[in-house]
Amino acid sequence: MPHPEDPMLRSALAFAGANTWLKGKTLPNEAGKGLVFAQDVAALDLWATELAVLSACQTGIGDIKIGEGVFGLRRAFAVAGAKTLVMSLWSVPDRATALLMEHFFTNLHQGLGRADALQDAHNYIRTITVKQLQQSPLGLAVLEELQEHIPQDYNFCQDNRPLEHPYFWGAWVCQGDTTAVKLT
């Protein structure tokens, strides 16, 4: 396990096999350790990467160093050259995240700038009604997932906006280039 004093070794992306390695069991060589540390990401060549989306829990946090900023995955992707990074500051329910990301990428494909696309996705999630959620399979899955995150006595009236609380959309931030992505 890496030295915990180095903040670039305390932030990592966990892939399949990470828990196996952390429990001291062996993985096939091609699987590595199942973890990619911020230090590893910083060493990559991502200068041609227009947009990196880290749709995982708390990917935007890290250690704060006065005069240096935040050390962690956020810094690692910037050092590696990714032009824009979209990441979360706290854990967000998976299906609500999927709905937000679906709208975000639709916005990008329609030519919106990166920050505007995310802001519009925030507004979409914040204002979507129960009735609108009931009109798609993903929306129905969101409503099912909500049963775990909101009070049991919540009224699922058609006009209610069950995702309006910032918990469901406010975690997502955009850092870097905010212009439209050039799609080919």
Image (spheres, rainbow, N blue to C red):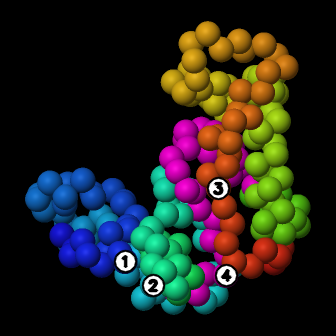
Asked if residue 64 is positioned above or below residue 133 in the image, the reply reads below
Q: Is residue 140 located in the magenta-colored stretch of the structure?
A: no
Give how far apart the Cα atoms at labels 2 and 4 are. Answer: 13 Å
Which quarter of the figure has residue 166? top right
Which of disc 3 and disc 4 is earlier in sequence? 4
Q: Is residue 44 left or right of residue 34?
A: right
Which quarter of the figure has residue 167? top right
Q: Is residue 36 visible?
A: no
Q: Is residue 144 left or right of residue 176?
A: left
Q: Which mark is residue 102?
A: none
- Identified by mark 4, the residue type is Lys
Residue under numbered circle 1: 8
Q: Is residue 17 left or right of residue 93?
A: left
Asked if residue 94 is positioned above or below residue 61 in the image, the reply reads above
* Residue closest to the far right: 111
- Identified by mark 3, the residue type is Trp
Q: Mark 1 and mark 2 in contact? Answer it, CB < 8 Å.
A: yes
Which of disc 4 and disc 1 is earlier in sequence? 1
Residue 50 place in picture, x, y as percent? 68, 79
**Dot 2: what SS?**
helix
Residue under numbered circle 3: 172
